[in-house]
Image: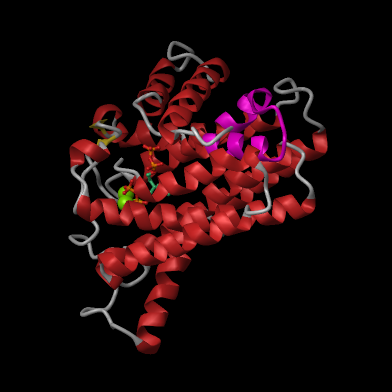
Amino acid sequence: MDDRFSPAAYLDDRKARVDKALREVLPGPEAPPALLHQAIHYSLFAGGKRLRPILALAAAEAVGAEADALLPLVAPLELIHTYSLIHDDLPAMDDDDLRRGIPTNHRVYGEDLAILAGDALQALAFGLLADPHRAPTICPEARLAAVYELAVASGSGGLVGGQVLDLRTPPPPEPTPSDGPERASALATLDGIHARKTGALIRAAVRIGAILGGATSAQLAALSRYGEGIGLAFQIADDLLDVDATPEEMGKATHKDGRHHKWAYPGVVGREASRTIAQRWIDGALDAIGPFDERAEPLRGLARFILDRRS
Ligand code: IPE
Ligand code: IPE
Ligand code: MG
Ligand code: MG
Ligand code: MG
């Protein structure tokens, strides 16, 4: 990579590769039961930035691995993410009607199929990652470590735990404290939710790419810090886009966090402080991978993209 690195071109190129891998590894929409597989394809191929598999590929590249060989093993990250979106939109959770620019899964297939499509996506993800016939050059130890990372990040201490906190933590105080221990406590609550519901899978994506790419333990520690920083910044950006972007840009409803009294950054600390805090996480992430050579340029570009994005 050189200084002409363009995040947009990189993202387009990697997204096409991830989409191709997803089509290759998934049962087709006609596989029985066809209704279930159609529901899966409906949400999975509606669009989506594919950021989590792309981060895994970029992390593998940063430690000198040939990223393409890992595609079948990083594509499952998108299955976990898509399952989490399908469930997140359910009436019992955020009750949303629009996702990736089209009606949400349950609006088209019904709540029963949406729940089951999510369940199937989750199991499919682990099956694909554990399948020794995919990316057979990857050693069993690295594959097992990747399965473990994905399980921990998806589970009760990660994504699912974060969704529970998102739904059940009593609403933030109003008016929100401008400083002092109450503000510190509000920020800690926010970060506790964000690090789990969104940060954990993003951090795991980076770590999985690094592990499969053969990272040293020092490289893995640095990349974990990078993953943690961009993961938190990613959800702060999502919260900011909820107040600043349009449904057309986002492909989902906006201005919902305030209406639903959600623990979201701009509502609790204001737009400006939200942006400053997110920038601080991005700076910390860039600092963590400072010692990496030019092969980490995609990771650097992706960190900047996370805050600059408009979708
Ligand atoms: C949206 O994730 C949900 C959050 C975790 C904030 P993305 O913004 O990555 O959604 P897609 O995959 O591009 O649709
Ligand atoms: C979703 O957070 C996090 C997930 C695990 C899916 P949000 O509820 O803020 O995501 P959007 O705004 O609906 O995409
Ligand atoms: Mg939610
Ligand atoms: Mg939501
Ligand atoms: Mg949101």
Mark yes or no: residue 141 visible.
yes
Mark yes or no: residue 93 visible.
no
Q: Is residue 180 above or below residue 109?
A: below
The one of 181 and 62 positioned closer to us in this rendering: 62
Quarter residue 269 falls in: bottom left
Prevailing SS of the magenta stretch: helix
Work out which quarter of the rendered image holds the C terminus and state it. Answer: top left
The one of 284 and 79 positioned closer to us in this rendering: 284
Q: Is residue 180 above or below residue 30?
A: below
Count of labels in the image: 0
Residue 240: percent from the left, percent from the top? 29, 56
Residue 256: percent from the left, percent from the top? 21, 54
Q: Is residue 175 above or below residue 53?
A: below
The one of 105 and 11 positioned closer to us in this rendering: 11
Q: Is residue 137 above or below residue 83?
A: above
Residue drawn at point x = 44 percent, y = 48 percent: 304
Query: Is residue 70 rendered magenta in the image?
Result: yes
Q: Is residue 198 left or right of residue 114?
A: right
Residue found at the far bottom of this picture? 180
Query: Is residue 6 rendered magenta in the image?
Result: no
Residue 139: percent from the left, percent from the top? 82, 32
Report the coloring of the rendering: secondary structure
Residue found at the far front of this picture? 3
Residue drawn at point x = 31 percent, y = 37 percent: 111
Please report the bounds of the magenta region as a residue range. 53-75
Q: Is residue 235 left or right of residue 54?
A: left
The one of 173 and 40 positioned closer to us in this rendering: 173
Residue drawn at point x = 55 percent, y = 20 percent: 21
Residue drawn at point x = 45 percent, y = 17 percent: 33
Residue 44: percent from the left, percent from the top? 41, 27
Quarter residue 117 falls in: top left
Q: Is residue 114 left or right of residue 290?
A: left
